[in-house]
Amino acid sequence: MLNLKPSEKPFANAPFFAALSGTGMHLTKYTMPDESNRDFIRIETTPAQIAEMMHAIRADKFEAECGKEAPKVKAELLGKEDSEWKGGSYSDLLVWLSGNIDLTEYLKERARLQKSGFDRKLREKIAMVSPRRTRFNSEHDGEWSLDRKWDSTPFQATRKALGAGRTIDLVVNCCASGGVSASQIDRFGVTVWAVSDLIEASGIQTRITARYAGHSFGTNSKGEGIDGEILVRLKDATQFVTPMRLAACFKTAFFRRPIFSLFAGFANLENGEVAYGLGSPDHGGYPIKFLPDEGKLTMSIGTMDVDANDMEREILSAIDATVKGAA
């Protein structure tokens, strides 16, 4: 995460986000902490709010409320001419987000990780702080002990000690350039889903954030470039999200339709212009890396090119730090 300072320059005009004000998305404008003083926009949102945004953009009144960038925003969400590159149509995405998605490939990847030994190593790490049964003496509960018949607590029993709370912050850098195919992005999503599912199954909770970031999405009214990121909280630590709904958020269409619409809307904040190709992506810096100072495990599309042992090492490092921190 960038260490940003809130901007002192208010938005001169933000019709796009005014039109989406009912969704609850949190929009903040920052100034980059360097000599450029470029605008940096951060949006914090959830899949439910994204779904509300999609319906708002389809509404007849949207173009009148949004302004000149409305056609571009709608085209990114609803366009039919490049559905293969976008990983599916708008209708497909609606079906997937409703929880109707084929999990065959996801479950195959989960099974592959289990057979590779990753699952076993994961559980060995967890065992360090797994709940254990401890023996205690009581005045009246448990079994009477002949050896303690003259003691004030002659009964013995066992109880299960509560395990420490354990949570991993998983930050998934989902941005990819236009040269990356939809099948590659989908494959990355399958891997992330399988890893997070195995971590949850082992007893560690996950807090999952999808990060979409880039540079020069557009220019403001002064011709200055606009950078930014969209943080979508896919799952909180104590929140249950069905496997199908979580899988839908890792589909290419989720990235290249509603997220692209938000990117196009960035330039609308100050009567700016949308950049050709929506600028350049920020991949997050690492294919996969545990950042101990931040307590975050980050993954990006480059994870697919990382050696399996290296990927396993970073994930288990995150598990190890989480387990020891909760012990």
Image (spheres, rainbow, N blue to C red):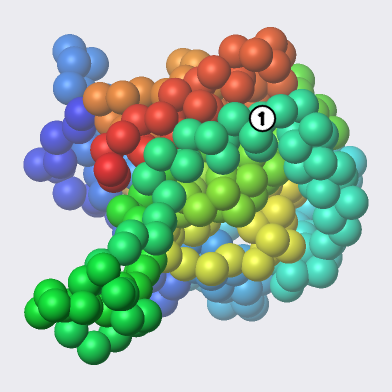
Q: Is residue 97 visible?
A: yes
Identified by mark 1, the residue type is Phe
Crowd band around label 1 with a 10 angstrom C-alpha radius: few (<14), some (14–19), many (20+): some
Q: Is residue 225 visible?
A: no
Badge 1 marks a residue whose secondary structure is helix
Q: At x 37% / y 45%, what residue is drawn? A: 129
What residue does disc 1 label?
118
Q: Nearer the viewer, residue 267 or 172?
A: 172
Quick check: 229 left or right of 38? right
Does residue 36 sit above or below 320 in this rendering? Answer: above
Q: Which quadrant holds the N terminus?
A: top left
Q: Nearer the viewer, residue 142 or 218?
A: 142
Residue 6 figure quarter: top left
Q: At x 18% / y 84%, what residue is drawn? A: 139
Q: At x 12% / y 75%, what residue is drawn? A: 151
Quick check: 315 left or right of 129? right
Residue 232: image x %, image y %? 47, 52
Q: Which quadrant holds the C terminus?
A: top left
Residue 191 figure quarter: top right
